[in-house]
Amino acid sequence: MVAYTGIQGQNILIVSSDPANPTEGQIWYNSTSNTLKDYQFAVVNAWAAGGNLNNARQGLMGSSSGTPTASLSAGGNPGPAYTTASESYNGTSWTTTPSITTERSTGGGAGTATATLIFGGDATPGPSTASESFNGTSWTNTPSLNLAKRNNAGFGATNIAALSFGGNQNPSTAEASTESFNGSSWTTVNSMNTGRTALTGIGTQTAGLAFSGQAVPGFSAATESWNGTSWTNVNSLNTAGSGRAGSGLQGSGICFGTSGPSITGATELWNGTTWTTNPNSMSTARGNMTKATSSSDGLAVGGATPSGTAATEEFTGSALVVRTITTS
């Protein structure tokens, strides 16, 4: 048997209690519990409560490429009217930020917490073409979408590189149309293979994923991959539904919640090829919430329960944890 010191060139630390601030890869022997331990990344795939929004609402739009500790959510429907409210998240609490220009709900979003783009959505008296950009300080009107839509989805890494897709113009339609934003204008590009409304997506302007939604008729489990030019059908979700949200990138992500055909907190995991049902669901069942991150560590914000909620939940895919090493 090869000794640990022969591999690593050092002895294993012997302590009576686990280190308060171990470093990744550190190994030690706990003499109290008589166990060998280390500090490594491990799969968690679980939800935990975060700080509540200041204003309960559903149908928010937000920074699809934010992080669990730096995200922005705006607009929505607290009932009975739409709102212009905007809030930023620091990983612990939400802070009110300057309001958006056009009050609306259920539009698409892209960018980071300090470079956010929101577009489309449900307004008064109907679907909107409005597009607005946030620079970390204030909102500015940007060129409008070519087609007015509500319940559209979007993704993008910044507020000058985004994609808008799906949605509807009236309750009897489900759009497949797609538009791309370059910071100066929206351009119509290749449509999705399946027209859907109240869908969601994750990724960047050149590598994304669209999934779930409501087709006409029925609910959809369809998933499509975007390569910057066209959409390709890939493996479907395990459960069809609308009003879902998602976090991550084209190769790794999560889908969570649903508002139809029933309201649930169900979660599915995407590994770049297939969806797998995750046994851990959100604590608050809801749909029509915003997605807020570009990592597989997700953030579920607001939503319909069926009334609007202020709840925020944080999903951890993997994390550094203390593990007991077993030997035989």
Image (cartoon, grey):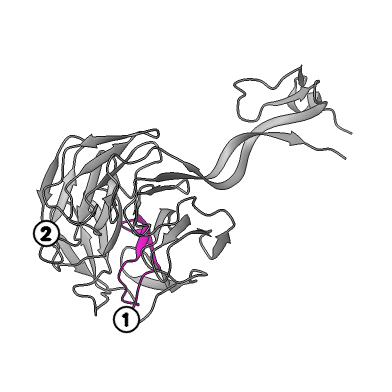
Q: Report helix, strand or loop for mark 2.
A: loop
Picture coordinates of residue 193 (x, y %)?
A: 34, 77
Element under disc 1 = loop
Q: Residue at x 52, y 70 (%)?
A: 238
Residue 312, quarter of the rendered image: top left
* Vertical arrangement, residue 26 with respect to residue 246, above or below: above
Q: Residue at x 40, y 57 (%)?
A: 286
Magenta residues?
194-215
Q: In the rendered image, which quarter contains the C terminus?
A: top right
Horizontal side, residue 316 vs residue 81: left or right: right
Residue 210 among those drawn in magenta: yes
Q: Residue at x 47, y 45 (%)?
A: 297
Q: Quadrant of residue 136?
A: top left
What percent of the width, then of the height, locates residue 34?
83, 26
Q: Which disc, if any, is residue 308?
A: none
> In the figure, is residue 207 to the left or right of 140?
right
**Residue holding disc 1:** 216
